[in-house]
Image: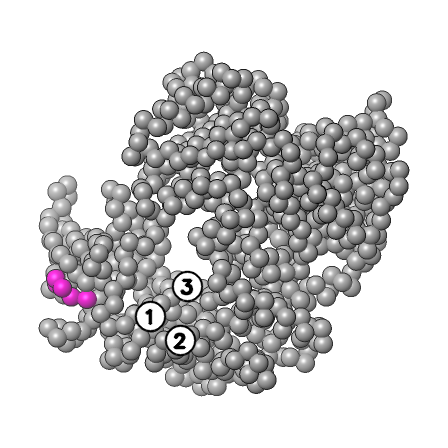
Amino acid sequence: MAQLSDPLADILGEKAGAALAKALELHTVSDLLRHYPRRYATGGELTTIAGLDEDTHVTIMAKIAKVELRKMQQRKGTILTLTITDGRSELSCTYFNQPGLVKELVKDRHGLFAGKVSKYRRALQLTNPQYLLLPDEDHPQACSSESGGPFGLAAVPDEQYFTRPLLPVYPAAAGVPSWTIAQCVRVVLEALDEPEDPLSADLRAEHRLISLSAALRGVHLPEDTAEVEAARARLRFDEALSLQLVLAQRRQADAQRRAPACPPRENALAAAFDRRLPFALTAGQVDVGREVAADLAETHPMSRLLQGEVGSGKTVVALRAMLAVIDAGRQTALLAPTEVLAAQHARSLRELLGPLGRAGELDSAEQATRITLLTGSMSIGAKRKALLDIVTGESGIVIGTHALIQETVQFFDLGLVVVDEQHRFGVEQRDALRGRGRDGATPHLLVMTATPIPRTVAMTVFGDLAVSTLRELPRGRSPIVSSVVPVLEKPAWLERAWMRVQEEVRSGRQAYVVCSRIGDDEQTDTQQETAAVLELAAELAAGPLHGLRVEVLHGRMPGDEKDAVMRAFAAGEIDVLVATTVIEVGVDVPNATAMVVMDAERFGVSQLHQLRGRVGRGGHAGLCLLVTSAPQGSPARERIEAVASTVDGFELAQLDLEQRREGDVLGVAQSGRRSSLRLLSLLRDGDVIAAARVQAQAIVDSDPRLEHHPGLAQMVKSALDGERVDYLAKA
């Protein structure tokens, strides 16, 4: 008999175990049983073809509408083309040099087709897909593209597979189609011992949940949709509880840590800064400032997320917190994701502080501090000077990129870490600075984001952070008008876009043009259809923007060159800056009023919103033109039109959550791991997450290390591997 922790190779054999591990990262019985069906098909139900996405591996059920076998024109061999349909849309399947398949792949036959969706001549297709043709009246025998059973299993599933009321369709991979996964699951379930349930009977009854054993069998071999829903409800709660237990443990651990108390001081640096501010703080800035000040006065570390619209004044809130910590005799660090943004922050803070930020200089104020910038591309001499100022405590504000995290950077007495645009950092990178406090103390943490966080994400990913929100924009911010430029339908609109840029520059203002790539790299077929910084800048300077001062900015330029370009643009010495997304966050040039985003379909909702926030930062209205070749009605086009229709970042954040893979929302790309969420939806399951949060807190309050809840401890460990637990614990 089998246990959840057993290697798959022990149950299915070495060949099967190796194939599942390589293709799908499934290693144990638990891994396979938590690889849940994506959906369930009933007899005759076809897959909707119109919703397929390029570069995804799919398993679809469709009917063969047309079969065509022809010889290749340029070389020897044959091409067999199937046209399969769901009754509304069609999809092409192409087989090279397999003419014998015409005997099986006949018109009007239904089957499952598995493969990677690609694009040829702007149409989606599957190339050499695996198939499993279902039996019907004219063809009583099923048949498969497998000549022999993959890794020891029969090429065609047994009769039970086709006679079940619901046919599970699994996320698959090359060489491992859905029906093969279904066979593996059945073999494992037949060998599985009754697993110990981590949830007590009382807890299950309280939340109306079925047992773990019933859930695992019900999700893979259901008799009806009610059984599927009961199974999914239980498994969703397990995922939510696993996450919330980790975060509850983190909150309790934070409460036990020691932090430097930094209460406000009268007539010190922070008070002097407030007196010299040339504008009035918004009500939101005042309220959030009080929350932060109260946190800083405590002897356990602040862990606060500050979210707010682009331009809502988060930097001023963060600076006031930094000055309070400096007044308490300690240092602060501001971590920025790019050198461009780090340099921008250094310039902005120096300008805001004036003489208060020039300690040691002739015109410095009495209470002044020093600002030090540290980036990877600085000269050796400049780095040495910066490191000396940091380790001696001469610098109260240290601004830098990933260079701040290096072991060579030693702080004199670090009291506060501010992380700007937290989604651009891996959690381990952020956490590295929190271990640099003096005498074992943990610095306070303020995390900032201009990408608003939906409530369910805040509860799940930032569940150990207090959340402050700035919704009000400072007076003086100008409106931004956004328009879609559909170049396929209306090519003349692109010419008009460049005319608008000319008009803005002739009015004394400046513009950005954003591209998705630099252009000095090897091009793929898809890249050839997209604009690149180096190529487009030359074309614009010689063509539609002739006579304007056009410069480029991208991430592979040396740091001093990037800084020089940004300084020149800020000084009005450049009319049009053609750049990659290095200008996405933090760049503040009030005179820049226009932006043209090329190939807007290649950017996400939040990224487009961030980019758009670079214009309209002064006294003149902003204009953002989203250039796209995405066809009308496509998901990409709808996404772009949604961005153009509103400047409400919170509304767009919800849209972003709806459209993105939730693993990305959880930062899996940063952690390098697959998402642990298989069924839990941050969009739909807010009530489940909230219930699990309350339950987890009650459990951890009474049993912090889960010593009296071994089943729950094991559930956390199995649902979230060690790296993932560590990742979430640091989030």
Check disc 2 and give the amino acid type: Val
Dot 2 corresponds to which residue?
228
In the image: residue 524, left or right of residue 658: left
Q: Which mark is residue 720?
A: none
Mark positioned earlier in the residue sequence (3 or 2): 3
Mark 1 surroundings within 10 Å by alpha-carbon count, few (fewer than 14), some (14 through 19), many (20 or more) = some
Q: Residues within 10 Å of mark 2 (few under 14, many from 20)?
A: many
Query: Is there a contact, CB below 8 Å, between mark 2 and mark 1?
Result: yes
In the image, 616 versus 194, the foreground residue is: 616
Magenta residues (range):
106-110
Which residue is nearer to you in this view: 205 or 417? Answer: 205
Identify the residue under disc 3: 24
Element under disc 3: helix
Q: How many angstroms separate mark 3 from mark 2 (CA)? A: 23 Å
83 up-or-down from 16: above or below: above
Q: Quadrant of the C terminus?
A: bottom right
* Residue 558 x/y as whole percent: 58, 29
Question: Image check: 212 left or right of 408?
Answer: left
- Give residue 507's position: percent from left, percent from top: 51, 17
Residue 433 against residue 366 in the figure, above or below: below
**Distance from the alpha carbon under mark 2 to that under mark 1:** 9 Å
Quick check: is 32 in the magenta stretch? no
Taking depth in this image into account, of 271 and 200 the one nearest to the observer is 271
Look at the numbered disc 1 and give the secondary structure of its residue. strand
Instruction: Please give the residue where the numbered disc 1 appears in the rendered image.
Output: 40
